[in-house]
Image (spheres, grey):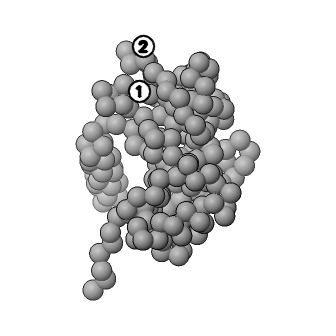
Amino acid sequence: MTGQHVRLASAAAIVALVIGGVMLACGGKTVAPSTSADNATRSVTVNGRQRQMPRGDELYWRVGARAPGFGGFYLDDAGNPTIVLLDPSDSANARVAVSQLLGGCSSAHPCRTVQGQFTYVDLATWRDSLIRDLFSSHMATSMGIDQRANRVEVGASRMSDSSIIAARIVALGIPLNAMMIRPGRRRGRAR
């Protein structure tokens, strides 16, 4: 093998280890996309519109485009694939889209549906509109979509700022009941 082939093989092994470590850490469950000030976004086109999205988010957007009432997807405590829908009786398109794009439903593991209040597209749009404001003001350390709760989760830098965060959410025209403000991850001090 040449030096370049060895470097490529080493890089592939590292990527495989990282992916395996993430799967072990997550217990093999689908994790909702989350954004922090430290992880990168990328530009993707969904439904003809170009957007900056966290990695992985575009698949959920595409499910939402195929199944307009789609509110999220998660594995419940028993490991059952679960689709969140505004109208659970209208699940055919969502089941197909989740199966094709997320690989979540199968004959061996049929998806169940639960009622949600918000679409994934709305939650992601609201999350994205808050990211720059709350991260640049250092009021949040993390932000993501809790698909089980069908809400945007804001990790507050200080819980004493939660009323200010709530006021900013309302000022942007975002329903406050679509948000969960919780303590965010603590950051270590620079030395």
Mark 2 neighbour class, 10 Å CA radius: few under 14, some 14 to 19, many 20 or more: few
At horizontal 46% and vertical 41% (from top left) the residue drawn is 149
Q: Can residue 51 be spotted in the picture?
A: yes
Q: As drawn, which residue projects farthest toward the bottom?
A: 191
- Residue 38, compared with residue 57, is above or below; it is below
Total numbered labels: 2
Residue topped by disc 2: 107
Looking at numbered disc 2 in the image, what kind of residue is underneath it?
Ser
Frontmost residue, 187 versus 165: 165
- Mark nearer the viewer, 1 or 2: 1
**Quadrant location of residue 122?**
top right
Label 1, label 2: how far apart the Cα atoms are: 12 Å
- Residue 27, compared with residue 89, is above or below; it is below
- Residue 64 is situated, as x and y percent measured from the top left of the image, at 62, 36
Residue topped by disc 1: 81
**Quadrant location of residue 191?**
bottom left
Q: Please, what secondary structure does the residue beneath circle 1 have?
A: strand
Looking at numbered disc 1 in the image, what kind of residue is underneath it?
Pro
